[in-house]
Image (cartoon, rainbow, N blue to C red):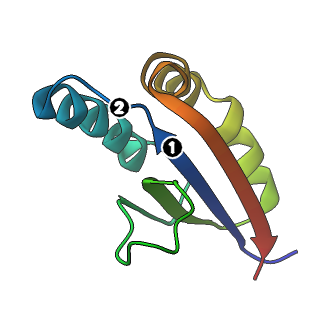
Amino acid sequence: MGKIVHIVLWKLKPFASEAAEQAIKAGIAELTTLEGPELMHLGPPAIEGRNKGYNWGLYSIFPDRETLDKYAVSEAHLKVVTEKIKPNFDEIMAYDWEL
């Protein structure tokens, strides 16, 4: 089995202030510090109009499916998902494929 590409797209809820939105995005960036992925990038869409409302995305590469599975259930990952992602995003879509 080859490397796994893991992509997640989010629709960030509207916030009352830019500071609140930046605090949430900083929390999401914690994902880049977790053990498992060989590569991870986060950010808003580079081209508006094609994103169908998804306004934040994550692109990552894992060495194999086993590493992705361990990452998905790790305490650190679940903490970010529970505390930073789920309360602040209306929709979440994940997609994985093998390289």
* In contact (CB < 8 Å): disc 2 and disc 1: no
**Residue at point 29%, 39% (across, down):** 25
User: Considering depth in this image, is 13 or 81 the residue closer to the camera?
Assistant: 13
Mark 1, secondary structure of its residue = strand
Q: Relative to residue 13, is residue 19 drawn left or right?
A: left
Quarter holding the C terminus is bottom right
Mark 1 neighbour class, 10 Å CA radius: few under 14, some 14 to 19, many 20 or more: some
Mark 2, secondary structure of its residue = loop
In this view, which residue lies farthest toward the bottom? 99
Q: Relative to residue 27, is residue 41 drawn left or right?
A: right
Q: Residue 96's x, y, as percent?
A: 76, 63
User: Considering depth in this image, is 23 or 66 the residue closer to the camera?
Assistant: 23
**Residue at point 70%, 52% (across, down):** 94
User: Considering depth in this image, is 85 or 97 the residue closer to the camera?
Assistant: 85
Q: Is residue 59 above or below residue 16?
A: below
| Disc ID at residue 64 | none
Q: Relative to residue 33, is residue 49 drawn left or right?
A: right
Q: Residue 23's x, y, as percent?
A: 20, 29
Query: Which amino acid does the dot numbered 2 rest on?
Result: Pro
Mark 2 neighbour class, 10 Å CA radius: few under 14, some 14 to 19, many 20 or more: few
Residue linked to disc 1: 11
Query: Which amino acid does the dot numbered 1 rest on?
Result: Lys
Q: Nearer the viewer, mark 2 or mark 1?
A: 2
Quarter holding the N terminus is bottom right
Q: Is residue 53 above or below residue 83?
A: below
Q: Quadrant of residue 81?
A: top right
Residue linked to disc 2: 14
Q: Residue 10's x, y, as percent?
A: 53, 46
Q: Residue 26's x, y, as percent?
A: 24, 37
Q: Is residue 92 above or below residue 20?
A: below
Q: Is residue 87 above or below residue 62?
A: above
